[in-house]
Amino acid sequence: MRKRVIVHGRVQGVFFRDTTRRMAESRGVAGWIRNNPDGSVEAAFEGEGEAVDEMVRFAHEGPRGAAVERADVFDEEPEGLAGFRVA
């Protein structure tokens, strides 16, 4: 399964990317996360359904210090990614 998520709100400068990376790695989820110029954070999660769903749920809340206004979620075809990287 693969989901792409774009998270809006106060989500940059609050360790969103690093926290997401650590969570993804501990759950065996592959993908990437990056800051966008508009202040949003964008991520792609690939892996087992339950683990990907857990990452999407986290994206709706974010780490302590984040203020998520909304998270747009898109279903995508898996690309066979390995590992999780912060871009």
Image (spheres, rainbow, N blue to C red):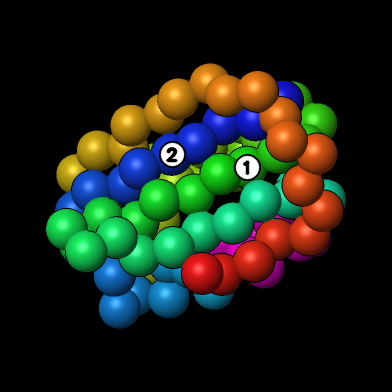
Q: Which residue appears at 64% of the width and 66% of the height?
A: 85
Percent across and percent down for residue 70 are 24, 38
CA–CA distance in space, label 1 to label 2: 8 Å
Q: Is residue 47 magenta?
A: no
Start-end of magenta stretch: 20-26
Most foreground residue, 49 or 77? 77
Q: Magenta part mainly helix, strand or loop?
A: helix
Q: Which residue appears at 56% of the width and 61% of the height?
A: 20
**Quarter of the image containing the N terminus?**
top right
Mark 1: which amino acid? Phe
Q: Is residue 24 magenta?
A: yes
Residue 35 in the image: above or below residue 18: above
Percent across and percent down for residue 31 are 66, 51
Percent across and percent down for residue 6 are 35, 43
Percent across and percent down for residue 28 are 83, 50
The residue that mark 2 highlights is 5
Rendering quarter of residue 47:
top right
Categorize mark 1 by other alpha carbons within 10 Å: few (<14), some (14-19), many (20+): many
The residue that mark 1 highlights is 45
